[in-house]
Amino acid sequence: MENINAPITRFMLDIFNFLGGVGLLTRQVVKELFRGKFYGKLLIEQVFQIGTRSLPLIVVTAVSIGMVMSLQFGLGLEKFGGKLYVPKLLAVTILREIGPVFTSLMLAARVGAGIASEIGSMVVTQQIDAIRALGTSPIKTIVIPRVLACLIALPLLVSIANIVGNAGGLMIGATELNLDPSFYLLKVLSTSTLSDYLSGFFKTFFFAMFISVPSCYFGLTVKNGTKEVGIATTKAVVVASILILIGDFFLSKLFWIVERSV
Amino acid sequence: MMATRRGVIEVIDFHKSFDKKTIHSGVNFYVRKGECLGLIGGSGTGKSVLLRSLVGLEKPDQGQILIDGKDIVPMREAELVEIRKKVAYAFQGGALFDSMTVHDNLAYPLREHSKLSTSEIDKQIQEQLEEFGLLGTDKLYPASLSGGMQKRVGLARAIMMRPEVVLLDEPTAGLDPYNTKRIQESILSLKSRGVTSILVTHDMPTVYAVCDKVALLYEGRIGEQFTIEQLRQEPPGIMSQFINGESA
């Protein structure tokens, strides 16, 4: 009986450890953010690493998804004579869901892995201890710049992904579905509302936290050498992706309630 | 327990366990101002853990660590900053920031804790590089330095803030005789400036060269401290066995 329960107990303990650890880390981040020195240069470096360097990946992902979805919507709706609805459907889907979620998932894979492995390696090589021993805080110098950089970069990347994704849809709409490009663009602009955009945009701040804080947490909790760096990296990507996907449902529901009440 | 003040550093009834394995079971020792204490003991006896605890990188399960009479055990990270300005820690592998050049590694503590201008910082860095025989390495990244150079840069960085106490974790481990001698000279130079130090090492020639006293960490405790003269003349009991390789 004990053997059957042991993995479940361990799994539950791991979840509680993670929740507690991430909670404490978030509290420390908030506490130290408004106290003492602010490392602007490190923040700019991280915005470049996380934002600018992710741009090609995000653009390729967004344009591909926009093109594929436009094609699939076109083929599906053509049977019912609804090809003209492709621009509206695609725009709303990209703005509300696909843009923020796919961009965040790609960022979780690229940046989450990078953050966890970089911090994990710093733990293993005692660089985090050195930061502390030199009288500075790894939260201020390592964690806060990465969290803030994600909070700045992700909304911008999502905004770019929204534009590029719709451009990809327009390209396929014009070439494969024989829709007039001006008509496509007009439909996108006239049928997409600000609330469509904001509903997706606000999610990105939560997704940025879902990526950055667990990734920093898994990096900082590496203990037993380089093997654990790999495990931490995997955990960071998996956990961030799960949080984004599960969080997306609840955030969509929340924004849906808010939109209905306004 | 009331703190009695016998030295710049005083450790009282220090206990530490990891995963139910007891490492320290009541360590007591002190180091007087300007002294260099050699802390020796077998591998895995917890010398580095003890050293890390002196700068607040580890917390003991029980006991007191007095630095200048102040118990650092209950202190929070923010309070430990002032202690860490006075007590420098030189890591075994150097623990250099691999994303920064040697220059930036050395500038790090000064940029953080002093109001020196860039030119003053550069001047101090050049002086430090010269003292440690590292001139010309300032633009290099740690990955392009040898192990010995990394250790010397690590030690140089640790003492950039002119600390009162320096904790050295196996500074000569794995080094050739030339680099070992340079590290010994650096420690002696610190001593001549009145800096108190604790040297964790297995390297007995270095102990004889730089330490005033030696303590053996054995079975979770530290017994009596012996002077180098006592050690040279007639190393007592277990200390003699350890030095001669007859016990771990």
Image: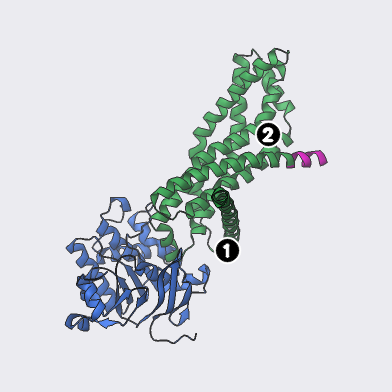
Chain colours: A green, B blue
| Chain-order first, disc 2 or disc 1 | 1
For the C terminus of chain A, the quadrant is top right
Look at the image and tell me whether residue B159 can be seen.
no
Residue occupying the far right of the picture = A261
- Amino acid type at circle 1 is Arg
B12 shown above or below A121: below
Name the residue located 64 percent from the left edge and 41 percent from the top edge. Answer: A246
Residue receiving disc 1: A35
Q: Which secondary structure, mark 1? A: loop
Image quarter of residue A178: top right
Depth check, front residue: B125 or A248: A248
- Please determine whether, in this image, residue B219 is positioned above or below residue A180: below
Q: Is residue B8 left or right of residue A71?
A: left
Kindly identify which residue carries mark 2: A96
Please tell me which residue lies in front, B203 or A262: B203
Residue A251 in picture, x, y percent from top left: 69, 42
Residue A154 is situated, as x and y percent measured from the top left of the image, at: 58, 41
Using the image, name the chain to which the residue with label 2 belongs: A
Which is more toward the observer, B115 or A124?
A: A124
Host chain of mark 1: A
| Disc 2 residue crowd, few under 14, some 14–19, many 20+, Cα 10 Å | many
Which mark's residue is nearer the viewer, 2 or 1?
2
Residue at the spot 56% in from the left edge and 49% down from the top edge: A11
Residue shown at the point (69%, 35%) measured from the top left: A197
Tell me which amino acid carries mark 2.
Arg
Q: Is residue B177 visible?
A: yes
Q: Which mark is residue B35?
A: none
Which residue is pictured at 37% across the width and 64% down the height? B121
Q: Which residues are magenta?
A: A254-261
